[in-house]
């Protein structure tokens, strides 16, 4: 009987030992899966609070890094556009400087004027691409200006922020914006180059059919640094001539009497200075626009440096916290060896 009770007691002790080991194994598995020496406040309130706080801080730093990287992406994109603008303005300035040479031939002047027009097109294309890309990413363009574009405020953390004021660096129809010169200036330079370089007055630049309900008269007038542009509705032939061979102005009566005569919309440009003088004025404006682009590029570079500094600091903080958390994550070698017996 004694031996039976002894065997039962031994079995009971073995069962209790097994239950204890199973409990320890479950506890260790929870610690291994969570990466912490404590898995709840019941294990160790102070240590678990510290581990949870560090984990939350790590998440905050990660979210901050995502937002800062998005802002950095926008700044880098703007810097790329500014670089294109700088290159285009430098080439425009070189061509304008060559146009101030009074000895240049008409063919040379025409080529130079076309180069300017091409560079302006490339410049505006870069701005439009920047605006479209920014819109697709849900933010406004820093270089295009206009609706939904302009400044950007970047949260640097710890109550600090950085605001980047946007710039309008595209070539506007009337010369407004950071570049300064206008599309009509580009057209005027081209017209004078083809004309031969002398003073140009009442040069018809474009002709298009007027609206059916339009009446004769001036539609708009704009004045830039080197030209005055007048858009008007007038009776003219398909070539844009408003008078007949005798120099008599066409009238409404000529619409049915003379083939090709219609009420048309004409763009008429008037310049009072010669090509050399106008090119010099244009050059001054273009160089001022280049200075504006350079200054904006420097601002963007400073902003990028500031963002990178914060990102580097956040990385350092994350490493420090990871090292601190690792002090709470070790499971003793003996505990691991014990668990190995039950694999």
Image (cartoon, helix red, strand yellow):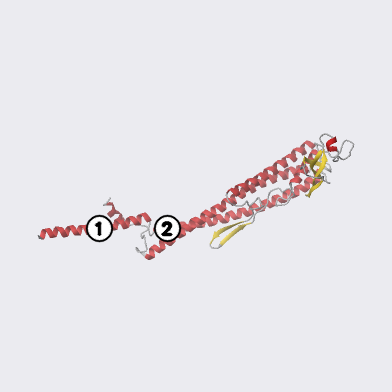
Asked whether, in this view, residue 154 is left or right of residue 34, the answer is right
Badge nearest the viewer, 1 or 2: 1
Outermost residue, right side = 246
Q: How far from the left and from the top, in percent, is residue 65?
A: 51, 55
Mark 1 or 2 closer to N-term? 1
Q: How far from the left and from the top, in percent, is residue 151?
A: 63, 56
Q: Nearer the viewer, residue 136 or 305?
A: 136
- Counting the numbered discs, the total is 2
Which secondary structure lies at badge 2?
helix
The local crowd at label 1, few if under 14, some if 14 to 19, many if 20 or more residues have their Cα within 10 Å, is few
Which secondary structure lies at badge 1?
helix
Asked whether, in this view, residue 5 is left or right of residue 127, the answer is left
The answer to which image quadrant residue 14 occupies is bottom left
Q: How far from the left and from the top, in percent, is residue 71?
A: 57, 53
* Residue 227 in view in this figure: no
The local crowd at label 2, few if under 14, some if 14 to 19, many if 20 or more residues have their Cα within 10 Å, is few
Q: Give residue 71's mark.
A: none
Say which quadrant the N terminus sits in.
bottom left
Outermost residue, top side = 259
Instruction: For the residues labelled 1 and 2, say whether their Cβ atoms are less than 8 Å apart.
Output: no
Q: Give residue 323's mark.
A: 2
Outermost residue, left side = 1
Asked whether, in this view, residue 229 is left or right of residue 121, the answer is right
Q: Give residue 19's mark.
A: 1
Please say if 100 is above or below 257: below
Residue at 40% from the left image edge and 64% from the top image edge: 49
Q: How far from the left and from the top, in percent, is residue 212?
A: 77, 42
Outermost residue, bottom side = 46
* Residue 68 in view in this figure: yes
Q: What is the C-alpha distance between the residues marked 1 and 2?
A: 35 Å
């Amino acid at each position: 009987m004694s031996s039976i009770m002894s065997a039962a007691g031994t079995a009971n002790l073995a069962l209790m030992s097994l239950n204890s080991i199973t409990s320890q194994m479950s506890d260790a598995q929870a610690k291994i899966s969570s990466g912490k020496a404590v898995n709840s406040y019941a294990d160790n309130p102070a240590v678990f609070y510290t581990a949870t706080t560090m984990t939350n801080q790590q998440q905050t730093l990660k979210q901050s890094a995502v937002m800062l990287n998005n802002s950095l992406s926008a700044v880098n994109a703007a810097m790329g556009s500014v670089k294109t603008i700088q290159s285009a303005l430098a080439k425009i300035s070189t061509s304008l400087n060559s146009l101030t040479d009074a000895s240049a031939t008409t063919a040379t002047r025409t080529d130079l004027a076309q180069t300017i027009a091409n560079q302006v097109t490339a410049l505006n294309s870069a701005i439009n691409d920047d605006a479209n890309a920014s819109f697709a990413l849900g933010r406004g363009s820093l270089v295009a200006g206009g609706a939904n574009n302009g400044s950007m405020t970047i949260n640097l953390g710890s109550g600090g922020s950085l605001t980047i004021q946007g710039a309008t660096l595209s070539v506007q129809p009337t010369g407004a914006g950071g570049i300064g010169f206008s599309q009509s200036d580009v057209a005027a330079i081209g017209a004078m180059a083809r004309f031969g370089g002398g003073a140009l007055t009442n040069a018809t630049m474009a002709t298009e059919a007027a609206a059916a309900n339009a009446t004769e008269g001036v539609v708009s007038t704009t004045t830039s640094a080197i030209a005055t542009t007048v858009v008007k509705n007038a009776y003219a032939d398909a070539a844009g001539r408003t008078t007949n061979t005798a120099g008599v102005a066409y009238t409404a009566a000529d619409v049915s009497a003379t083939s090709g005569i219609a009420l048309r919309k004409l763009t008429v440009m008037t310049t009072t200075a010669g090509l050399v003088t106008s090119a010099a004025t244009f050059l001054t404006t273009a160089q001022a626009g280049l200075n504006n682009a350079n200054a904006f590029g420097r601002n963007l570079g400073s902003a990028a440096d500031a963002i990178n500094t914060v990102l580097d600091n956040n990385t350092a903080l994350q490493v420090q916290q990871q090292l601190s958390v690792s002090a709470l994550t070790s499971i003793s070698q003996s505990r691991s060896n014990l668990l190995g017996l039950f694999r």
